[in-house]
Amino acid sequence: MQADYLDHDAIGLADLVRKRKVSARELLETAIARAEAANPAINAIVLKDYDAARQRASRERVNGSAFASGADDLGDGPLAGVPYLIKDLGLPVKGLRMSMGSRHYRHYVPTEDAPLVTLTRAAGLNIFGKTSTSEMGQMPFTEPELFGPCRNPWSLDHTPGGSSGGSASAVAAGIVPLAHASDGGGSIRIPASCCGLFGLKPSRGRQPTNAVPAPGDLGIDHAVSRSVRDSALLLDLTSGNAEQPMGAPGTFLAATREPCKPLHIAFVTDPMFAPALSPDARAALDDAAQLAASLGHRIEPVSLGIDFASLREAFLMIWSISAENLVLKADQITGRKPNRDEFEIATWTMGHIGRKLGERELPEALEVQRGVSAKLADLMTRYDVILCATLASAPIKIGEMQPTAAEKMQMRAITTVPVEPLMRKLLTDVSNKAFAWAGCTELFNLTGQPAMSVPLYWNARGLPIGVQFATREGGEATLLRLAAQLETARPWFDRRPPLMPARI
């Protein structure tokens, strides 16, 4: 199986299992072998659950009967037998540690599956490990102190992005064809861009949640994948919830098989939260616009006319509340009082910013969020899709955006004596550094619109740079039709990074 494992996406692998050309156990052993060979270099997988996955794979169902006695753990779902990895953040898996990249949470073991995990298992995906994330998903790169940096298979000196960097690195290295990812500010699309993958952030409310929604409702779960159709099928299998069912089963996979009608595309070159787009990012954006035009789409340059300075401040205030909940109120999850020494100083500081500033300024931030959501909803009455940058530049190098010694000193000081002007200045300085690279995705978390990063461009150094498309809320089918068309016009599935050998 190892010789042609990389030739198939998840749908293709599941089809082989269904036709009994390969067993689920053989697929799993191939994935494990690839993980054991690649992970020492990329550090993407931070928890292994091989034995339990082997037991599930040895009890697969064929024609309604199990190969062996015992529970039929994989079932006969559309993706039955396909190996899968879960991001180690925010999505509880019964019996598996959920460290969230943090020393405080490193012994926390959930006792129940999240609703989305239940749906994942029903699809037939075989979870055999968990992937690295930045601590609490706070950073757009994946370098937790607890596990060390995760690396990009396209260049080990560069980041795979974050906070779903471990999942993207594992998929890019050919360990699995798709992996779970989540996105509260770009954490699906950023690593998809860095690793040459497809990454779709679904609409707000598209999937069931496992907790009380955080202020602003920024985050949502889905996946990074090598193929568009895998992402579409997984969205079919995990969509809808009791409060807000959206779409009928089969809608999204069917969309990838339908012709994409000519679309009116708003071409946006605003850097959003970033000060400017690099020449590489602008080249990727221009290239995508030209490709879309060649496919019959109408491209119209548009300025969004948004006060991004105000919007950025609102995003940071909402974001800080989430940090406060996970850090300073961690005892509500783990039952243990949070200790300063158990968190990275930047994460600890953001929690204190949430307590000092975020709580007070949240109502105003939410009003800004409502305003920009209305503005973008109005824009989408005139355009079908927005095309813009995913990142302001190519993947950065490992360590490039870590806090300096001086910044860490300031963080320690303001968490001890929270002087508001100093706290605001530090937040501005530190966020400037992050947004200079990863400031193009947060807008669509604020508005709740679906958005995707599509791997259409590699720079002269061989590093991937994705481009971003967004549409109106609930419009994933439009994005998926377009993505499938782009995938056909500019195939990327067989583009393999240096750390993705055909055999292990």
Image (cartoon, grey):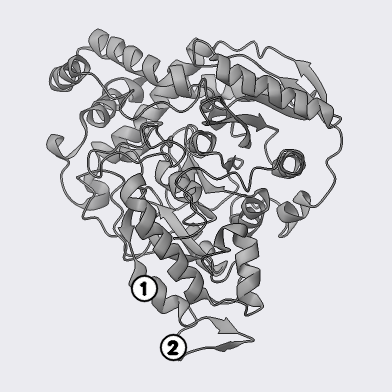
Q: Judging from the image, what secondary structure is the residue with disc 2 in?
A: loop
Which residue shows up at 77% across the image and 50% down it?
255
Residue 299 position, x and y percent, is 79, 21
The quarter of the rendered structure image containing the C terminus is bottom left
Q: Which residue is identified by label 2?
A: 70
Q: Residues within 10 Å of mark 1 (few under 14, many from 20)?
A: some
Q: Position of residue 290 (x, y in %)?
A: 76, 23
Is 28 on the left or on the right of 407, as rendered? right
> For residue 201, which quarter of the picture?
top right
Of the residues tagged 2 and 1, which is closer to the observer?
Answer: 1
Tell me how many marks there are. Answer: 2
Which residue type carries mark 1? Ala
**Residue 217 in sight here:** no
- Determine the residue positioned at 46% across, 69% down: 28
Q: Is residue 304 above or below residue 38?
A: above
Q: Is residue 13 left or right of residue 148?
A: right
Task: Relative to 397, say whether 214 is above or below.
Answer: below
Would residue 6 be seen by someone viewing this image from the given angle? yes
**Residue that protrudes farthest toward the bottom in the picture:** 69
Q: Which residue is mark 1?
A: 52
Q: Is residue 66 left or right of residue 419?
A: right
* Residue type marked 2: Gly
Q: Is the residue marked by circle 2 packed among few (<14), some (14-19), or many (20+) residues within 10 Å?
A: few
Task: Mark 2 or mark 1: name the one nearer the start of the chain.
Answer: 1
Q: CA distance from mark 2 to mark 1?
A: 13 Å
Quadrant of the snapshot with the N terminus:
bottom right
Residue 142 circle label: none
Residue 3's quadrant in the figure?
Answer: bottom right
Q: Residue at x 25, y 43 (%)?
A: 102
Residue 91 percent across, percent down from the top left: 41, 53
Q: Secondary structure at mark 1?
A: helix
Q: Quadrant of residue 285?
A: top right
